[in-house]
């Protein structure tokens, strides 16, 4: 008799919950499909309206997660779970998790600030938190850079938004700061002419702003010249290395001495 009661009870539960379970599964499948299509449509819309690439990824990630949470609540409601109670549980859990993950929330807030104020965008060359690299991706909690030696650098958005950021790409051009020393016997005007010719002849040195060559310092063993060519951000290191090499060759060809430390060997008399 007891067995029959259990069978009857099980049958009632199956009859009562099977439609709800089927409906919940259907809602989950259809809901995920709709979310994917909606996110895809928003991505196309943002692209046609020339939204910043980093802003696109950030907003699409955020929208995707919010819609997934809403879908989960709808599915649970379909199964008969009291969604108001569930919402209260989520709020309480959210508070507890928030207290435990203050750093992550700070990173999230930092990501929002970066999106709002846009100190940099994907593709910019920046220096931040002691690292230099090209911005590869701006995520909700972190920003990824590709370092100059092709390393992947991941910086938390919280510290990134609160620290100093140097953006080398904003203006599109950079000044290359070089210093060359020549001997005190060298003719200053001749030296300046040789250095300026190197800058004028280099195809990647910009002529506007105009490059400059000036005496910077009368050092202990050399007269130091500040050599300041300008280049595009992309050509910075090409100009840096080329001008350094070509300056050495040009000074040697002109017979202008580049001082260097001389070691004096004292021989003891035997």
Image (spheres, helix red, strand yellow):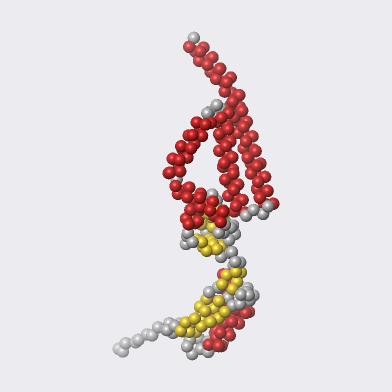
| Relative side of 23 to 270, left or right | right
Which of 105/245 is in front? 105
Q: Relative to the observer, which residue lies in front, 113 or 170? A: 113
- Residue at the image position 49 percent from the left and 34 percent from the top: 88
Q: Position of residue 98 (x, y in %)?
A: 45, 43
Q: Residue at x 43, y 44 (%)?
A: 99
Q: Position of residue 220 (x, y in %)?
A: 42, 84
Residue under the image location 55 percent in, 76 percent down: 228
Q: Is residue 48 visible?
A: yes
Q: How many numbered marks appear?
A: 0
Q: What is the quadrant of the C terminus in the image?
A: bottom left
Q: Position of residue 112 (x, y in %)?
A: 54, 51
Looking at the image, can residue 142 be seen? no
- Above or below — where is 260 with respect to 175? below
Q: Residue at x 35, y 86 (%)?
A: 266
* Residue occupying the far left of the picture: 270
The quarter holding residue 175 reads: bottom right
Residue 108: x and y in percent read 51, 49
Identity of the residue furthest to the right in this view: 48
**Residue 174 occupies which quadrant of the picture?**
bottom right
């Amino acid at each position: 008799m007891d067995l029959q009661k259990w069978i009857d009870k099980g049958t009632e539960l199956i009859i009562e919950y099977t439609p709800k379970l089927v409906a919940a599964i259907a809602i989950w499948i259809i809901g995920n499909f709709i979310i994917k299509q909606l996110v895809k449509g928003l991505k196309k819309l943002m692209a046609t309206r020339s939204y910043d690439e980093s802003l696109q990824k950030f907003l699409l990630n955020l929208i995707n997660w919010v819609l997934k949470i809403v879908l989960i609540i709808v599915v649970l409601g379909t199964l008969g779970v009291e969604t108001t109670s569930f919402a209260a549980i989520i709020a309480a859990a959210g508070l507890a998790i928030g207290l435990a993950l203050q750093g992550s929330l700070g990173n999230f807030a930092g990501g929002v600030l970066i999106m709002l104020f846009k100190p940099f965008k994907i593709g910019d060359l920046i220096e931040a938190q002691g690292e230099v690299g090209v911005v590869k991706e701006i995520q909700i909690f972190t920003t990824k850079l590709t370092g100059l030696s092709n390393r992947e650098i991941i910086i938390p958005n919280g510290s990134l938004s609160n620290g100093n950021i140097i953006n080398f790409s904003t203006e599109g051009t950079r000044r290359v700061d070089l210093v060359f020393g020549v001997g005190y016997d060298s003719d200053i005007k001749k030296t300046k002419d040789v250095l300026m010719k190197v800058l004028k002849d280099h195809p990647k040195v910009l002529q506007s702003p105009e490059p400059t060559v000036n005496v910077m310092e009368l050092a202990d063993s050399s007269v130091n010249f500040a050599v300041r060519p300008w280049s595009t951000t992309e050509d910075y290191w090409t100009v840096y290395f080329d001008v350094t090499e070509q300056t050495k060759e040009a000074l040697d060809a002109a017979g202008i001495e580049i001082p260097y430390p001389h070691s004096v060997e004292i021989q003891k008399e035997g």
